Amino acid sequence: MAKLLKRAVDALRPHANRDVFAWDSELRGFGVRVKPSGVKSYLVQYRNGEGRTRRLVLGKHGPLAPESARNLALKALAAIADGKDPSAERHATRASITISELCDWFLTEAEAGRILGRKRRPIKASTLHMDRSRIETHVKPLLGKRQVRALKLPDIEKMQADIASGKTAKPRPDGRGGTTTGGPGAAGRTASMLRNIFAHAMRLGIIENNPASGVRVIAGKRRERRLSTDEIKLLGKTMRQAEIEGEHVVALAVIRFLLLTGYRRSEAEGLKREWLHVSECYVKFPDTKTGGQIRPLGTAAGQLAEDQPEQRHCPYVFPSNFENGHFTAVDACLARLCRKAGLENVTPHTLRHTFGSVAGDLGFSELTISALLGHAARSSTQGYVHLDDAIRLAVEKVSSEIAQLLNVDVATVAKLAA
């Protein structure tokens, strides 16, 4: 074959039962291999000091252009002429890689956007933040020093059992209160995460097999906690008293907004004014846990958001006290309120679950509730939810019902915030 150029490599076709090779006419040993699957990879073929034929894969065609592969081949051939065996060195490195090193590799590559997650998109920063936390809290202390090649399925399941039993429990880092306690939910999510890391590494040729393949992941308990009608009233009364006593007004506004919308905490805290369309009763999120969405918005929630005082140069509805970021301390305020009210096991997710439960109490279908909560898109029509009168009526009814239980006076709240 002549010099390897993109057009020539693109034209190569796979064979059903064997690899197909094409060699460059100008650089001896430099070629491309086509697998039966159609995957094309650049490589260098050479003989090591013992006279054995070796093949060093340089990278896949597509992400790697022919000229870039040629440059890598030149460097490899120069090292070979100097007596080195790059293929053997690569295999030795991969064989000795530890769990800790592999996790660090994954985080570096994922944060750079070179590893794709759901829907073939770069993994979200919020997801990677949780992955890093699980790696540092659970994976590294239990398995970090182990070599991947020596790891077996029972080792993964033992790690999961240890996390579930609280073996990795410790105070939270960065000065946050409380402790990480582990439990079945954390154990299952960590095992699933590690299995996915191995899968990415195996697909990209970093390791040869996935030691977590076939792991039986512990099923976490489904969170069923919701606030009853009396508890919503009690929380509303407690918030009004807390306003008088000087509780942070932005935190209180976010908590009310969560109850009135059923939004996720991150969606409420990071809400920008440009996304608000109060008169049309919706918020247009450019991105959420399940992708970009248009989410319905009731009148009480819309007025609460619209009436929040603007902070100069800050795009967020619920601004932070510092610089131009958004508010992030809802958990602490909610915990204080619940202690005063005597409410237990209440988290921001409880408020979201309460909104959905009230919708159910009012007789709305699971499909409607799913649309209100912004669960994963069910069809291409979800992008037009703001045009659906039935959804608009549902969010208005649920939001109004909760506003009455909270005894929310939006105008008063806005004055206090000012």
Image (cartoon, helix red, strand yellow):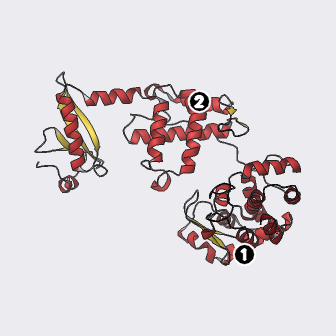
Residue bearing mark 2: 159
Residue 367, percent from left and from top: 66, 65
Kindly identify the amino acid type of the residue bearing the numbered disc 2: Met
Could you tell me if the residues under marks 1 and 2 are in contact, i.e. CB atoms within 8 Å? no
Residue bearing mark 1: 393
**Residue 308 figure quarter:** bottom right
Query: Is 55 drawn above or below residue 270 in the view shown?
Result: above
**Residue 96 figure quarter:** top left
Q: Residues within 10 Å of mark 1 (few under 14, many from 20)?
A: few
Residue at the image point whose x is 71% and y is 51% from the top:
329
Kindly identify the amino acid type of the residue bearing the numbered disc 1: Leu
Q: Rounded to the nearest whole Å, what is the CA distance between mark 1 and mark 2? A: 48 Å
Front-most of residues 351 and 385 = 351
Quadrant containing the C terminus is bottom right
Residue at the image point whose x is 48% and y is 47% from the top:
111
Residue 292, percent from left and from top: 55, 64
Q: Which of the marked residues, 1 or 2, is nearer the chain's N terminus?
A: 2
Front-most of residues 322 and 261 = 322
Image label count: 2
Please indicate whether residue 254 sits to the left or right of residue 233 in the image: left
Instruction: Label 1, secondary structure: give it.
Output: helix
